[in-house]
Amino acid sequence: MKTRTGRFPIGFRRGRGWQDNTTDLADWAGGVGFEAVDLGEATAEDIRVLRDHGLRVGTCDLLSMALLLSPDEGERKEAVRRNIDYFKKLTGLGIDHFFTAVIPKDPGRSRSDNYSLALATLDELAHAAADLGAMIVIEGWPGVFPYYANLCCTPETCRRILAEVNSPGLGVNYDPSHLIRMGIDHIRFLEEFAGRVGHVHAKDAEILGEAIYEYGITQTSVFEPQFYCGENYWRYTIPGHGQARWLKAFQILEKAGWEGIVSVELEDQSFHGSSEAEKLGLACSLAFLQTV
């Protein structure tokens, strides 16, 4: 099944538990109408099973992502070597989008020092990917308290690293939920970076105004629990249950000539805790995206 605007194929990012068995996962995904799956760290067998079920592979994760930004030069070089070998293996199987988050192994170091590590590593990896006709797509998740250490998740950092690496082998994974929770205009971001989008995550976010009054945005509650995949004043939701402007986003992508996959990333407390709840959340997301 596809989105109404842009006719983008709809997939989802593989989770854990009931999704561990690739054959069972592919049976279910194809049966409800998904066209693709983001596999995480993939094997040749995973890829074969999906294709045997008529499904596409959206993205595969880079290996040892934290070690790619290790302060230890030997660890970084070994992680880069492993990933270039991984590129060669998986591009030979037709995989052309690789997912990563630019989060350093030691988030306590200065952001400028960690950025220098990220720039050097991503420059080498992006050019290796481009030589193979592939792209690394950078996830915009800002990271966790207290560091929020992702070095490429805001307009400032995305703009800078894309310009300095300057390779078609590096792009962004557009996920409006992260931008919304950070207070960044997700539509303006897409208007600026549409030409560098390699992949899209269909995840939304809800900002809870009453909770901002109670706790602000820099404190957590002393008495109330935080949301699963959220804090006291915001939470991730399935697409359509938050504040993202999906129609406008798809119109921008369509106008830019984008032809990628829109993948649901299920991190919604309302559809969490059992395989039945997760399957319902994915199916509801698919139904919503078809209408946009």
Image (tube, rainbow, N blue to C red):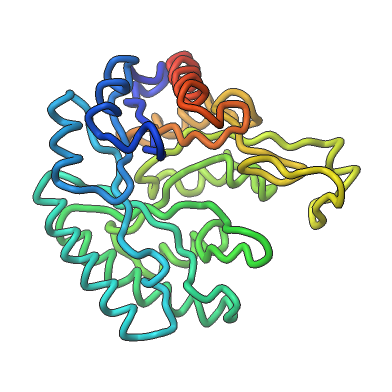
Name the residue: 34% across, 15% down: 32
Q: In this view, does 34 lie above or below 195?
A: above
Name the spot of residue 4 as percent of width and height, x first: 41, 16
Residue at the left extreme, as displayed: 92
Q: Is residue 7 left or right of residue 182?
A: left
In front here: 75 or 126?
75
Q: Is residue 2 left or right of residue 105?
A: left
In front here: 156 or 204?
204
Name the residue: 31% across, 23% down: 29
The image quarter containing residue 121 is: bottom left
Name the spot of residue 208 as percent of width and height, x first: 78, 36
Residue at the bottom extreme, as displayed: 73
Name the spot of residue 11 as percent of width and height, x first: 35, 29
Q: In this view, does 23 lie above or below 39?
A: above
Residue at the right extreme, as displayed: 214
Name the residue: 11% across, 46% down: 93
Name the spot of residue 285 as percent of width and height, x first: 48, 22
Instruction: Check the picture and name the quadrant holding the N terminus.
Output: top left
Numbered circles on residues, count: 0
Name the residue: 17% across, 24% down: 53
Q: Is residue 34 left or right of residue 251?
A: left
Q: Is residue 98 above or below residue 227?
A: below
